[in-house]
Image (cartoon, grey):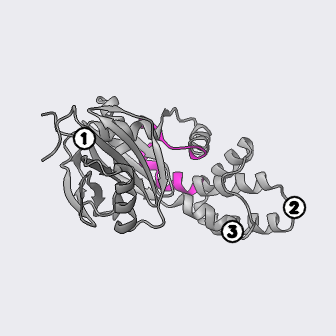
Amino acid sequence: MRPPRNSSWLAINQDGNRLTAWEMTGTSAGQARQLQLQDSGPAALAAAVRQMLAGEPRPVLLGGSPLAPLQTVPVPLAELPLAELQVEGLPVHALPGLSQAAPCAVLRTALAPLAGFLRLNPEWDGVVCLAGQTTHWVQISAGEAVSFQSAMTGRLVQAAAQGTGLNTAGDWAQAELAEAVADGLAKPELLAARLASVQAAAGLGQIAENTARSRIWGLLLGAELAAARPYWLGQNLALIAEAPLQGLYAAALDAQGLPVTLADPRRMALEGLAHAWPSN
């Protein structure tokens, strides 16, 4: 049985090895807690959830889980069916993920923030960019996720920075980021060569760390924008991202003259989870 809306329960959103959790009473939330798992497997997840429950049996609603089933787009985000899972013997209600056949894509962690954004902005028609280690560009129309495109920009930045010893989350220069975004957007076919040049210049000490970081992020964001052009050109655009990604993506989009609605990912995830229970 799913719990009534005024009962005590646990809301959790999973992002790989990281959990963000809220103690809930109905739709009222306590302070967010974050836990780091040893791995993203079911045993580590079940152990962390049991730790949070502290021996008090309560319903658990989980978003972002790789164990949850997938719903094929197009799908209305206000009517997502909850799955009933057993995670190492622990009963859990789970939000599904989204899948798409062509181009092949899967969206899991970003589903709760996306649903929360649509809950708070029910008339939104346009595109929502959910930036993370994998970024998703989701087309929304009449409350439905119509299609989406994904990019691994965050992971590629980390790979490109490995050869230079850069901290990818450090400071960056807006002017140099914007210039690199323009280069990546105009000629994405030169991406690999330009990244190699940045690595070499950083390794030889010819450019400062924040310059190298700005160019790496900018080139890869520009290539992502080139690939996602149909999702942002002429569209209402919202960006849901944590720092520092929110600033980086916002600067890249601003350099193209694109107005963007910014939304807090933690608040959106909570909103999506809090209203996922049935109304009766």
Check disc 1 and report the residue beneath it.
276
Coordinates of residue 160 in the picture (x, y in percent) = 65, 66
Check disc 3 and report the residue beneath it.
162
Quadrant of the rendered structure where residue 101 is? bottom left
Is residue 59 magenta-colored?
no
Check disc 2 and report the residue beneath it.
206
> Label 3, label 2: how many angstroms apart (C-alpha)?
17 Å
Chain-order first, disc 1 or disc 3:
3
Query: Vertically, is 160 above or below 207?
Result: below
Coordinates of residue 255 in the picture (x, y in percent) = 62, 39
Q: Secondary structure at mark 2?
A: loop
Q: Residue at x 52, y 51 (%)?
A: 225
Coordinates of residue 275 in the picture (x, y in percent) = 26, 36
Quadrant of the rendered structure where residue 204 is? bottom right
Say whether residue 101 is left or right of residue 22.
Answer: left
> Label 1, label 3: how many angstroms apart (C-alpha)?
40 Å
**Type of amino acid at the residue the image marks with label 2:** Gln
